[in-house]
Amino acid sequence: MLIIGEKLNSAIPSVREAILNKDVDFIKELAKKQAAGGADFLDINTAQGNSEIDDMEWVVRAVQEVVDVPLCIDSVSPDVIRKGLEVAQGKTMLNSISMETSRLEGMLPLIKEFDCAVIALTMDDNGIPKTAEERIKIAGQLVDILKKQNVDLEKVYFDPLVLPLAVDSNNGVIFFECLTEIKRLFNVKTVSGLSNVSHSLPKRKLINRNFLTICMSHGMDAAIMDPTDTKITSALIASNLLLNKDRFSRNYLKAFRNNSLED
Ligand code: THG
C-alpha cells in the first residue's frame, strides 16, 4: 500500500494560515513529520489560499528543501498542476484527471510532458455517479482514453470517490464493489482519500481507520491519509501483515522495535 500524505492541504485551517503567513518552518515540519510517518508521496493542495499557483510553487520548493519524498500535485486547475510538476524534482504524481471534459483536455498533455503517475477520478460532467456500475463505466472510458494516449497504466491509480455513509448507508459497500470490479475488469491500481466516508458522523478517525483496512482487503493500492496518525499507520501495518504483504513480518516487527505500533 502506497501512503500519500494528506496534510499539506490548504483545506486544513492551520496549513492555510501557514501559507498565507509564508510560515516556511510550519510547512517544512509537516513535510518532515509525514516523511517520518512513512509517506511514499506528499499530496500538495493550495486551492484555499490567495494565489493557488504561486502558493503551489512556494510549498513545493519549501518541502523539497527538507525531504526527498516524491510529490503528488493536487488541483483541479491544469495551470496549477503544470507549475507544481515544473518545480517538483524526481518522481511526481498528478492529482487528478477525470472524465470532466475541460479537466481531461487540460490534464492529458501534462501526463505525457512530465511522465508522472496519475490519479484518475471516476466522475464526469454530471458529477460522481451514485451507483457502482456508472463509476466502473467511467473507469473503462478513462482506461480506453489513456491507452490511446499510450499512457503506461502501471502509473495510473483509479479513485472511485467514496461518498458519505451519512448520505446513504450503502455508500461504503458501493465503494468496495468499485475497488473489486475496477481491478478485475481493467487490472489497474486503485486509490482513495479516507475522510469523505465519515462526513457528519462522530469519531471520524475510528470510521476512517476501519474503512482503510476494508479497502486494503479489497486490494486497494494506495491511500491519501494522515501518516502522522500512529493509530491509522498501526492499523495499516497490521493489515499488510494479515494480507501477506509483509514477508517474515519484517515491517511489523521493525515498527514494533521502533515503538511505533499502537495497540
Ligand atoms: N481523492 C483524491 N484527492 C483528494 C481527496 C480524494 N485530495 C483531497 C482530499 N481528498 C484528501 N486530503 C485530505 C486532507 C486533509 C483532510 C482530509 C483529506 C483532513 N485533515 C484534518 C487535519 O489534518 O486536521 C483531519 C485529519 C483527521 O482527522 O484524520 O480532514 O478523496 N484523489
Image (tube, grey):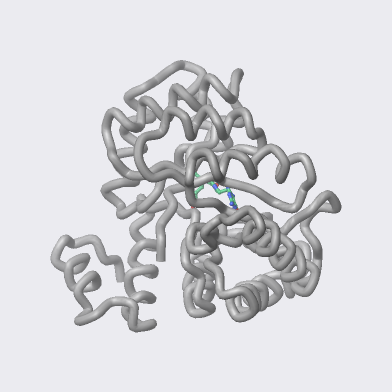
Q: Residue furthest left?
A: 257
For the point 77% across and 62% down, the residue is 167
Question: Which quadrant of the figure has residue 75?
Answer: top right
In the figure, 97 relative to 172: above or below?
A: above
In this view of the protein, which residue sits in the foreground, 138 or 50? 138
Residue 253 image position (x, y, % from top left): 18, 73
For the point 75% across and 53% down, the residue is 99
Residue 161 image position (x, y, % from top left): 66, 60
Side of 131 relative to 254 (left or right)? right
Quick one: quadrant of the C terminus?
Answer: bottom left
In this view of the protein, which residue sits in the foreground, 68 or 187? 187
For the point 47% across and 29% down, the residue is 86
Residue 218 image position (x, y, % from top left): 53, 78
Residue 57 image position (x, y, % from top left): 47, 24
In this view of the protein, which residue sits in the foreground, 14 or 240? 240
User: Does residue 194 show up?
Assistant: no
For the point 57% across and 53% down, the residue is 119
Quick one: quadrant of the N terminus?
Answer: bottom left
User: Does residue 124 show up?
Assistant: yes
Q: Residue furthest right?
A: 126
Side of 39 relative to 36 (left or right)? right
In this view of the protein, which residue sits in the foreground, 153 or 204? 153
